[in-house]
Image: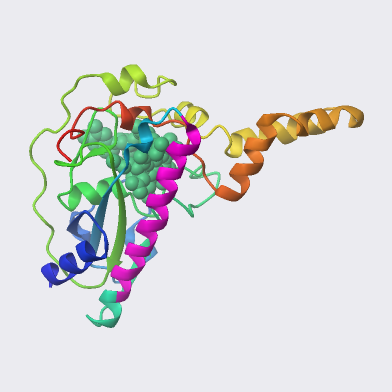
Amino acid sequence: MKETIRSFALEAGGEYVGFANVSDYESPRSPSIEKLYPGAKSIVVIAYPELSTCESPSPQIAMNGRMDLMEFSRSVNYKVARFIESKLGAGAMTVPISYPMEMSLETMGGIGELSLRHAAVAAGLGAFGRHNIVIHPVLGTRVLFTAVITDLDLPSDPRVEEELCIDCGLCVENCPAGALDKEGYTDFTGCLKKSQPYGIGGMIKFWSQLFATPEDERKKLFRDPHYWKLYQAGFIGFQYACWKCMASCPVGVRKR
Ligand code: B12
């Protein structure tokens, strides 16, 4: 059964596919899978290479590469879920690559429904590195994941036991927010400020500034490129402006 799903998902466009039985998925800060999908038994995790766009000095080119991947992977995820439902007669639910995400004071918009990194590790698709993201044995750090949860009871693939991080420290050195200084922890606020300057924090700042500005001076704020970037992010969705931990990691770059 696993090989039938794996071949379909590879054919559909996934680069690597792994399986994690729900009993092997552990992510203490994430909601329990039972809350997402009562009766779920396994997670199909799909890995995709991030293009060299993440190295581009142009924020537009870098983000466009991510948008291509987000769109592509959404379609792969849907196809795999449809295959499980229509051809294998089982249930399947897709998990977002990044958003929608629960926006609440409890999660602060920082906790996904399913932790794709923890699912990827449980599915044998990699191991955590010093940058707290997952390194794939071939794709290195430049990898993104999506997942489909199913009620098919499938055994997990073997975990990656080797150490993939070479501890070069480049991710820590290159992080403009110092967000990786403490091992095993990413400073969420620091990373967010640099990686999503036109996100909710930027929005709140802009609107607060606008209301505090006398009416006859408000036009100036709208004529500022900062507002134009907020405006663009409003219809593009989450827009990343930093890729340093991914792009500076040398692991896997020449192997692909
Ligand atoms: C919210 C979110 C963020 C937030 C918060 C990150 C965070 N602390 O979890 C912010 C905005 C800061 C962020 C930043 C980035 N993100 Co992000 N993000 C997510 C999202 C949507 C949810 C993550 C989540 O639920 N976190 C909460 C819980 C689960 O995390 P946690 O238990 O606290 O785990 C943390 C630590 O405990 C530690 N950790 C846990 N176990 C272990 C074990 C070991 C051995 C080690 C060393 C560390 C470690 O790692 C975590 C980092 O703080 C996921 C998609 C998804 N649904 O999973 C993508 C995701 C994690 N992001 C991703 C990426 C690529 C990025 C960025 C590079 C930005 C960019 N340009 O794309 C940076 C990297 C930041 C970094 N180096 O940590 C990828 C990572 C892919 C990969 N190769 O692992 C994901 C999986 C998206 C995807 N679909 O592939 N992200």
Residue 198 placement: quadrant: top right
Q: On the picture, is 89 further left or further right than 53? A: left
The secondary structure making up most of the magenta span is helix
Report if residue 93 is visible in the image. Answer: yes
Q: Indicate the quadrant of ligand 1 in the picture.
A: top left
Q: Is residue 170 above or below residue 112?
A: above
* x, y percent for residue 208: 74, 32
Residue 75 in magenta stretch: yes
Would you identify the image quadrant in which residue 173 lies?
A: top left
Please name the residue shown 47% across and 31% down the image. Answer: 58
Residue segment shown in magenta: 58-82
Left or right, residue 66 beside residue 133? right
Which residue is at 29% across, 65% downward?
149
Quarter of the figure with the C terminus: top left
Q: Position of residue 152 (x, y in %)?
A: 21, 73
Q: In terms of depth relative to the viewer, which is nearer, 30 or 145? A: 145
Q: Which quadrant: the N terminus?
A: bottom left
Q: Nearer the viewer, residue 14 or 34?
A: 14
Q: Is residue 203 visible?
A: no
Q: Residue at x 44, y 32 (%)?
A: 188
- Does 60 sit above or below residue 26? above
**115 falls in the magenta region:** no
